[in-house]
Image (spheres, helix red, strand yellow):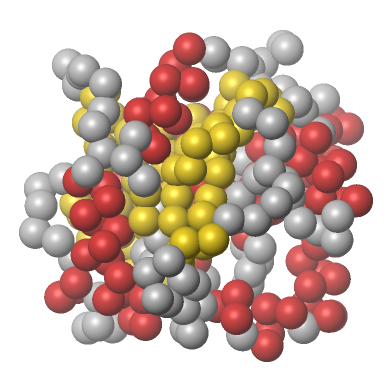
Amino acid sequence: MSRRVTVVTAVHGPSARFLPDAYASLRAQRLPDGWEWEWLIQEDGTTDEVRPCVPDDERVSFHQGRPGGPGVARTIALAHARGAYVKVLDADDRLTPGALARDLAVLEADRTLGWATCRVLDLLPDGSTAGFPGDPDAGPIERGAVLDHWERNDFRPQVHPATLCVRRDLLTALGGWMALPASEDTGLLLALNAVSRGWFSAETGMLYRKWEGQVTNGAAHVDPAERTARTTVAGARARALAEFGWTYPAGR
């Protein structure tokens, strides 16, 4: 019987044109024997813009729903997930060859790890790529390390939450992504690290597309009042989980 990893993508109209590139990067993945992937594409809305860009592939399913932001879209997509692991792939990003296999190898080998992340390169409009300093050493990330770094570095985590591969039972136990207008993936990362160890791979696993329509380029994303509210809620959640003593796996 095949084992499965579920790839979840939130998409809205402006980013739909990048879905073919994301699909090509997914098709290029070579998984270990006995494994397969499924791709859940969830539109944040109910327009006619996205469906024409969805690949015709039996491994791909497309759903729509009322708009609530990417965190809501990803979380509602979990209703259709069948994989033991959930991998994030934003509509405008691309996986590098071997990314899924590396995630699976790490998480299958060590049950004390709840999630995995990897190095990212920015994919610039001219097709070139650029890295940035500050990646941690390859290996395990101990509980609480992400929150500590985030609080000491202007609310920037040391690993990229858009590269998450996470055990589905742990993801659903935490309620999926946070109900925030932005930084919902960082909020999830903080919560995951509050209850479980993670992993960072120094091999590049994702190309993070930089383009004019990115939500993170908008003025609202850096509005001081909203940013303060987002970081306050995300940090409080992570600290509360740690104080309650919840752990994954249970009892550790």
Quarter of the image containing the N terminus? top left
Instruction: Please name the residue shown 66% across and 24% down the image.
Output: 140
> Which of 245 and 192 lies nearest the eye of the viewer?
192
Q: From where the camera sits, is residue 66 visible? A: no
Instruction: Please name the residue shown 54% across and 40% down the image.
Output: 118
> Which of 219 and 209 lies nearest the eye of the viewer?
209
Asked if residue 51 lies left or right of residue 235, the reply is left
Asked if residue 50 lies left or right of residue 79, the reply is left
How far from the left and from the top, in percent, is residue 155?
81, 58
Instruction: Please name the residue shown 60% across and 22% down the image.
Output: 113
Quarter of the image containing the C terminus? top right
Give the farthest residue toward the bottom.
Answer: 219
Where residue 132 sits, quadrant-wise, is bottom right
**In the image, residue 16 above or below residue 196:** below
Q: From where the camera sits, is residue 85 visible? A: yes
> Which of 26 and 67 lies nearest the eye of the viewer?
26
How far from the left and from the top, in percent, is residue 27?
20, 46
**In the image, residue 79 above or below residue 139:** below
Instruction: Please name the residue shown 55% across and 14% down the image.
Output: 111
